[in-house]
Image (tube, coloured by chain):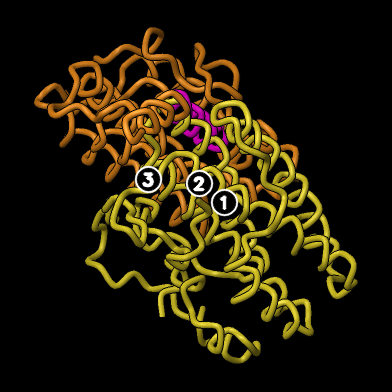
Amino acid sequence: MARLAAIANWFQSPTQPAPAQPLPFDTDYAAWAESIELAMVALYNEVLLKLTGENVATAARFRDHHQAHAQAYASLAAGKAKGAPNSALIYVQTPALQGAADEATALTSLVALENQMAETYAYGLTLVSTPDVYDRMVTTLPVESEHAAVLGTILQLGPPELFVTGPFENASVGDGTDPRRGFDMATFPLG
Amino acid sequence: MDRRRFLQCSTAAIVGTAVLGACTSSDKNTGPPGAPPTTAKPASSAGAAPTDITLAKTAASIEALLIDAYKQVAASRLINSPGLQTYTSVFADHHNQHLAALNGIITTTNGEAPVSAPNPVVQDQIVGPALSAATTQDELAHLFFTLEDAIAQTYVYAAGAMSRPDLRSSLMAIGGIEARHRVLLGIQVEQLSLDDLFPSPFARSDNPLPPDALQT
């Protein structure tokens, strides 16, 4: 009887046991996450030059958060982390930031990037099974969502722009052109 | 007291806004600067980790609690600020959609009845008395900031404890939005500093709810 109950429970909620060792894909993902976090650090450094007053301190704080996130992911990457910004993301995003004509445009670009980081992790959570890796993503995602919201308040955005994907973070990725979709590992490979 | 331990305050400590303030006024992280949050897995009173269905039902009951609380506040007409009125309306709509999504998990994945009632433990011990005691817009705003703060942390806790990747993603698709609610109220209503809002580069993941609030 107890065994039947256990089987029924398994069918209702098929628990997947956590792997004893980090899965190779998951350490790949952690290394990749380090690279996009370091890209965010570099992109913030580009934008800092265009900001004034308290916005400089706010952006510097968020940049430092991304640095801390990068370090955390690197520690989970089983030696695969390269310690370098994701070059494809830098290549795609830097021209827009460098070309921002004013502070508002620069901040708008940061809002989009932070939204995309949150969407990236919402999707990434569907991929990984190693507890240390998904625990780190779970504690990173909300902070990046909050970055987008804080920067949005500086721009005095309304709810449609503060919640660009509506009542849910969008668990999908793309080529970086759609602010409602995160960054695809295939489009922005490690390196 | 750590702000995020608000929902673990005793019944007596939450009745009366003066005490409510004392229960929520300090949000300094007591850990070392930049220290990662705890990631201890949750345990029920029996010592075993709660199941996916328990976590989904608990989150749904907290969503129902917030929906009910926002309805009461709208009916009370205590909130006069247009900005706060907009937020409460938008956030209430979000919570309705979050509850529907969670009930989709509960009914489809687990074949159980949907959750529609507010979490009885949090309602009876904390939110009911606090709502009754609040008489000003500022007190209500403070209560809602604290509730949004707690529910955002609840999702981080629950997502880390879920057994399946798709469920972890689904919960954090909601949890990220709750975090936005938290920070918007924190900045624009509570006028908190970034030090207060970001005591660490990482979100906290310990359970902010009373232990008996889990819905089995």
Question: What is the C-alpha distance between the residues marked 3 and 1?
Answer: 18 Å
Q: In this rendering, is residue B20 above or below B195? A: below
In terms of image quadrants, where is residue A88?
Answer: top left
Mark toward the start of the polypeptide (3 vs 2): 3
Residue B86, x across and y down, in percent:
81, 55
Specify the amino acid type for callout 2: His
- Mark 3 belongs to chain: A
In terms of image quadrants, where is residue B17?
Answer: bottom right
Q: Which mark is residue A147?
A: 2
Q: Is residue A76 visible?
A: yes
Q: Nearer the viewer, mark 3 or mark 1?
A: 3
Q: Is the Cβ of the residue at disc 2 closer than 8 Å to that at disc 1?
A: yes
Q: Colour of chain B?
A: yellow
Q: Which mark is residue A139?
A: 3
Q: Is residue B18 left or right of residue B159?
A: right
Question: What is the C-alpha distance between the residues marked 2 and 1?
Answer: 5 Å
Q: In this rendering, is residue A117 above or below B7? A: above
Q: Name the residue rendered at 57%, 51% in the picture.
A: A150
Q: Secondary structure at mark 1?
A: helix
Which residue, given by chain and number where applicable, does mark 1 sit on?
A150
Residue furthest toward the left?
A79
Which span is picked out in magenta?
A109-123
Specify the amino acid type for callout 3: Thr
Q: Secondary structure at mark 2?
A: helix
User: For residue A131: magenta?
Assistant: no
Mark toward the start of the polypeptide (3 vs 1): 3
